[in-house]
Image (cartoon, rainbow, N blue to C red):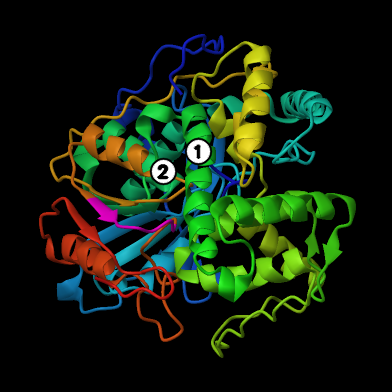
């Protein structure tokens, strides 16, 4: 997620030529043709959507001119598995990003107890997946974590060239690929489904999308779970800078833990010694990258990122420590633990072209991320980005670091979004349930607390934990039990039983060698 998403109100904003504020809900009469369209639901063709229904829904490219060009959004549905009398309506989902496909999430959430009572809906946001693609026809910029001063200038060149390619390929469409328009697409899908209101569960960037939906359509939203919430006061640059700081905080926790276990791992008896071991290994891998038996290349950039990623997941610190021990000592890497096979796991089509086409719908294309960044204000001084990238490179040795402080592509783009980012408010009746990990580096804790405050909603704190996203069928152990049972109980009591959420905390996954309180 560091490189695919989250991935701001600042002085000196990018001079974006926003049109008039169009955040007021568009009158239904302008969208009658879209709300009343006939949609054919059929069994999904893509192998990873086995068991789901799929459909294509038409939406306006520009909601300010709905009579103009139309685009498609791909939608999936997992019908409620319980009795009809248990059904509670539809539950919309989004997995985050920005830039992650959403149809597969209908199964991810539908396979939990929520799928008994809800028709679970997944939607590929406009721009990717089975929806109309945003395609710049070139690869997006490389995200180096610790560039030299010379490489910083190359980053400016790469992003400028990418912006020019996007302008040439998609200049008319790209300004309309925003969070607000994705939320409006959701509401067209709601109307097509014949539902007066929806419930919602979103993760990471999906928390912001859900809050934007509720702001634009307060009469259409009932309950909302915002899992690992983004900071509404930091959209988008301050969110990125906070990620680098939070990663460093986690690396300090991790290296303290490793130092306490020097007898076991031999990486150093103090935090400083462990960090020195990591720095020396980074320098060695810069000159001599190491290839593992499975083909994985451990170079400096990957190693620095791996330290940051591993520091987040305290439940697996003992496992990742064995990898770092082998990399530092230049000994054989441990074998990856075997995962239990799933005999029901669908396999890709045997036809390579068909398999590639389906996987493309699952993975991308990867351009929506960069377009969404442009809906917010950014500094305009290039030298500020240069200074910030050098500062973050030097202050944050591991994790995303300087990548997060670089210039946005929209700094070099001719076409800008047609409206500013949505100012979040909660006019819908039911408070949301906001979830935050105390040490989550992808959506740092203070940002989630800000989201709870902005929406006047309770905050569920996952204590002493750096994980990102806490609910879903994939957040489970090999036996299928939730890794975070306290979180699961809160989410299901709220969505299934209508229990009013309260500020509370959970501590479900202690550090290795410690017991859950």
Position of 18 relative to 153 (above/below): above
Of badges 1 and 2, nearer the viewer stands 1
Q: Position of residue 92 (x, y in %)?
A: 35, 54
The circle drawn on residue 110 is none
Instruction: Of the two numbered discs 1 and 2 on the same chain, state the one appearing first in sequence.
Output: 1
Q: Position of residue 460 (x, y in %)?
A: 24, 53
Confirm or deny contact between disc 1 and disc 2 (CB under 8 A): yes
Q: Position of residue 261 (x, y in %)?
A: 52, 69
Visible residue check, residue 236: yes
Neighbour class for label 2 at 10 Å: few (<14), some, many (≥20)? many
Neighbour class for label 1 at 10 Å: few (<14), some, many (≥20)? some
User: Which one is nearer the viewer's eye here, 96 or 166?
Assistant: 96
User: Which one is nearer the viewer's eye here, 508 or 264?
Assistant: 264
Quadrant in which residue 82 is drawn: bottom left
Range of magenta residues: 460-467
What residue lies at 68% left-to-right and 54% top-to-bottom?
Answer: 278
Left or right of 413: which side holds 435? left
Left or right of 67: which side holds 186? left
Q: Secondary structure at mark 2?
A: loop
Left or right of 108: which side holds 26? left
Position of 510 relative to 170 (above/below): below
What residue lies at 62% left-to-right and 15% top-to-bottom?
Answer: 384
Residue, disc 2: 444
Visible residue check, residue 43: no
Does 465 appear in magenta? yes
Residue, disc 1: 245
By secondary structure, the bulk of the magenta-drawn segment is best described as: loop
Q: Position of residue 355 (x, y in %)?
A: 73, 69
């Amino acid at each position: 997620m560091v490189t695919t998403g989250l991935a701001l109100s600042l002085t000196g904003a990018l001079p974006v030529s926003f049109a008039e504020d169009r955040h007021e809900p568009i009158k239904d009469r302008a969208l009658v043709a879209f709300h009343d369209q006939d949609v054919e639901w059929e069994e999904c063709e893509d192998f990873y959507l086995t068991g789901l229904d799929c459909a294509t829904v038409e939406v306006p490219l520009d909601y300010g001119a709905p009579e103009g060009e139309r685009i498609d959004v791909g939608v999936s549905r997992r019908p409620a598995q319980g009795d009809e009398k248990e059904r509670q309506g539809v539950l919309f989902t989004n997995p985050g990003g920005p830039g992650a496909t959403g149809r597969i999430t209908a199964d991810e959430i539908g396979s939990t107890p929520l799928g008994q009572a809800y028709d679970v809906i997944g939607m590929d946001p406009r721009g990717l997946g089975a929806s109309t693609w945003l395609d710049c026809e070139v690869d997006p910029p490389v995200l180096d974590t610790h560039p030299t001063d010379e490489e910083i200038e190359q980053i400016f060149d790469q992003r400028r060239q990418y912006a020019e390619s996007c302008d040439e390929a998609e200049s008319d469409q790209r300004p309309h690929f925003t969070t607000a328009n994705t939320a409006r697409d959701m509401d067209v899908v709601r109307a097509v489904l014949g539902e007066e209101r929806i419930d919602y569960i979103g993760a990471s960037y999906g928390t912001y999308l859900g809050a934007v939906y509720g702001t634009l359509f307060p009469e259409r939203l009932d309950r909302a779970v915002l899992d690992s919430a983004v900071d509404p006061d930091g959209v988008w640059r301050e969110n990125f800078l906070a990620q680098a700081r939070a990663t460093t905080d986690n690396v300090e926790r991790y290296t303290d833990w490793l130092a306490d276990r020097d007898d076991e791992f031999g990486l150093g008896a103090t935090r400083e010694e462990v960090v020195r071991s990591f720095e020396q290994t980074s320098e060695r891998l810069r000159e001599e990258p190491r290839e593992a038996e499975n083909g994985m290349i451990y170079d400096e950039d990957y190693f620095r990122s791996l330290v940051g990623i591993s520091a987040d997941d305290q439940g697996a610190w003992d496992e990742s420590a064995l990898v770092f021990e082998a990399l530092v000592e230049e000994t054989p890497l441990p074998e990856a633990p075997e995962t239990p096979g799933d005999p029901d796991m669908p396999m890709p089509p045997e036809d390579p072209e068909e398999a590639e086409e389906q996987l493309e719908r699952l993975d991308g294309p990867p351009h929506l991320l960069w377009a969404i960044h442009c809906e917010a204000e950014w500094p305009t001084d290039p030298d500020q980005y240069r200074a910030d990238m050098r500062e973050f490179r030097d202050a944050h040795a591991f994790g995303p670091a300087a990548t997060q402080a670089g210039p946005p592509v929209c700094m070099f783009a001719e076409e800008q979004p047609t409206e500013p980012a949505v100012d979040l408010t909660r006019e819908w009746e039911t408070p949301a349930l906001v979830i935050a990990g105390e040490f989550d580096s992808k959506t740092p804790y203070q940002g989630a607390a800000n989201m709870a405050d902005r929406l006047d909603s309770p905050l569920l704190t996952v204590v002493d934990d750096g994980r990102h996203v806490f609910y879903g069928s994939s957040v489970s152990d090999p036996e299928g039990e939730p890794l975070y049972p306290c979180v699961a109980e809160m989410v299901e009591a709220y969505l299934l039983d209508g229990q009013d959420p309260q500020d509370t905390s959970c501590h479900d996954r202690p550090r290795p060698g410690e017991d859950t309180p």
